[in-house]
């Protein structure tokens, strides 16, 4: 019997099997990074898309996050902020860079990461250049001046009654005993004393009457000075910023807001008439043309836009109000949320977020 050696047979079998194996199983190759569809829309300072690829503060933040997570990015451009909000539920993207204000309503339909930065709403108005008689008359309608004028008239009327009561029996020539005419003459004397320091055709005889007169000679100077100061301050404020100085002044005003943002319900809560625009740029254009009386938007975006040369006639007024944390939006139940939150915390701890923010917006308190 002839014996066959197994060596050549085994070698032939191995060669045959190797010919049928895929190349990837024969030699290990590095795994390609996972690609994510990241939706963006032009937002002042946060995202700008003027060339082949977007730029901006949020783009720099995302590129640092993508590097830490080891993922590649395919940017998906959405035309408006409203479309950006809709792209995740519609399945057009995996991530949406807003930044997105973290609110309860949005958490119901999206997943939102930890805060990227903290900001709030601010009011932009057009600087007014009008001067003259009509502007002065408009300034007189301010509540502060009307309140001051009302207090002065009330005190003058009260003092007129007291002065007539003390003088009516001892000084009938200056203050007649009859009530309507006597009170009128006494009130006229008080008004003359406030404005000119006295009244030439009337004199005061009684001790109590002279006490009232002396009080008004001193108090009239203070009242006129206060009224003049308030009038000057009001006219200056009206000329520079108009009638809107803070959130309380939005009631009854036409206010430009970005459609789909958190500003629309905020303005309506304060009695303002919200007029929606697709972008903040369009809202500011409307403000410059006088189509709206103010624009409410994120403070940092308004700071960036109003610093540009073509917005020199727009000013920010009032304090920051309705503060929000801003994060990154993901599809509901996204497995990326935990990894992104960890990376965001690391960026915050090593000051990467602050460096990126300062590079785009400058350092602000």
Image (cartoon, rainbow, N blue to C red):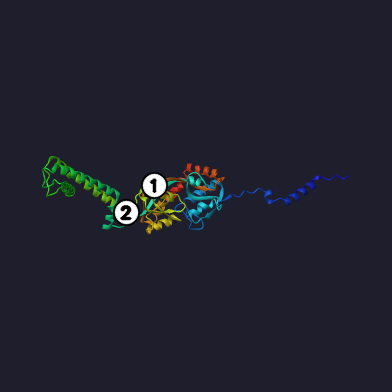
Is residue 362 among what the camera can see?
Answer: no
**Vertical side of 313 occupied by 165: above or below:** above
Q: Which residue is mark 1?
A: 320
Q: Quadrant of the N terminus?
A: top right
Instruction: Look at the numbered disc 2 and give the secondary structure of its residue.
Output: helix
Q: Quadrant of the C terminus?
A: top left
Residue 176 horizontal/vertical position (percent): 13, 47
Write the residue at 26% across / 51% down.
Answer: 232
- Residue 124 or residue 355, whichever sits in front: 124
Q: Which residue is mark 2?
A: 240
Residue 315 horizontal/vertical position (percent): 36, 53
Q: Earlier in the sequence, mark 2 or mark 1?
A: 2
Q: Local crowd at mark 1 within 10 Å, few (<14), some, or many (≥20)?
A: some
Write the residue at 50% across / 47% down.
Answer: 328
- Residue 178 or residue 137, whichever sits in front: 178
In the image, taking residue 117 as reference, residue 216 lies left or right, namely: left
Instruction: Look at the numbered disc 1 and give the secondary structure of its residue.
Output: strand
Q: Local crowd at mark 2 within 10 Å, few (<14), some, or many (≥20)?
A: some
In the image, taking residue 217 as reference, residue 255 lies left or right, namely: right
Is residue 351 among what the camera can see?
Answer: yes
| Mark 2 → mark 1, Cα distance in angstroms | 19 Å
């Amino acid at each position: 019997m002839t014996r066959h050696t197994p060596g050549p047979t085994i070698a032939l079998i191995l060669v045959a099997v190797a010919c049928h194996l895929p190349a990837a199983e024969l030699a290990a190759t590095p795994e390609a990074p996972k690609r994510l569809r990241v939706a963006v829309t032009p937002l002042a300072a946060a995202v700008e898309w003027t060339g082949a690829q977007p730029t901006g503060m949020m783009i720099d933040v995302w590129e640092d996050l993508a590097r830490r997570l080891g993922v590649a990015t395919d940017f998906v451009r959405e035309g408006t902020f409203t479309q950006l909000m809709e792209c995740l539920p519609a399945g057009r993207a995996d991530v949406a860079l807003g930044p997105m204000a973290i609110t309860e309503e949005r958490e119901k339909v999206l997943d939102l990461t930890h805060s990227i930065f903290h900001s709030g709403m601010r009011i932009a108005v057009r600087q007014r250049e009008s001067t003259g008689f009509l502007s002065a008359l408009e300034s007189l309608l301010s509540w502060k001046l009307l309140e001051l004028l009302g207090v002065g008239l009330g005190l003058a009327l009260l003092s007129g009654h007291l002065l007539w009561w003390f003088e009516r029996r001892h000084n009938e020539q200056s203050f007649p005993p009859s009530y309507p005419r006597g009170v009128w003459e006494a009130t006229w004397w008080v008004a003359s004393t406030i404005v000119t320091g006295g009244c030439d055709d009337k004199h005061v005889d009684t001790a109590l009457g002279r006490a009232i007169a002396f009080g008004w000679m001193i108090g009239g100077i203070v009242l006129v000075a206060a009224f003049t100061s308030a009038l000057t301050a009001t006219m200056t404020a009206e000329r520079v910023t108009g009638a809107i100085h803070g959130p309380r002044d939005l009631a009854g005003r036409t206010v430009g807001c970005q459609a789909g943002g958190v500003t629309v319900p905020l303005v309506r809560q304060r009695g303002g008439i919200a007029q929606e625009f697709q972008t903040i740029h369009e809202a500011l254009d409307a403000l410059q043309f006088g189509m709206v009386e103010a624009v409410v938007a994120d403070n940092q975006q308004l700071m960036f836009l109003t610093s540009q040369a073509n917005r020199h006639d727009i000013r920010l007024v009032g304090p920051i109000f309705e503060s929000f944390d801003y994060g990154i939006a993901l599809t509901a139940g996204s497995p990326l949320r935990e990894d992104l939150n960890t990376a965001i915390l690391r960026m915050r701890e090593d000051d990467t977020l602050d460096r990126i923010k300062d590079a785009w917006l400058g350092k602000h308190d």
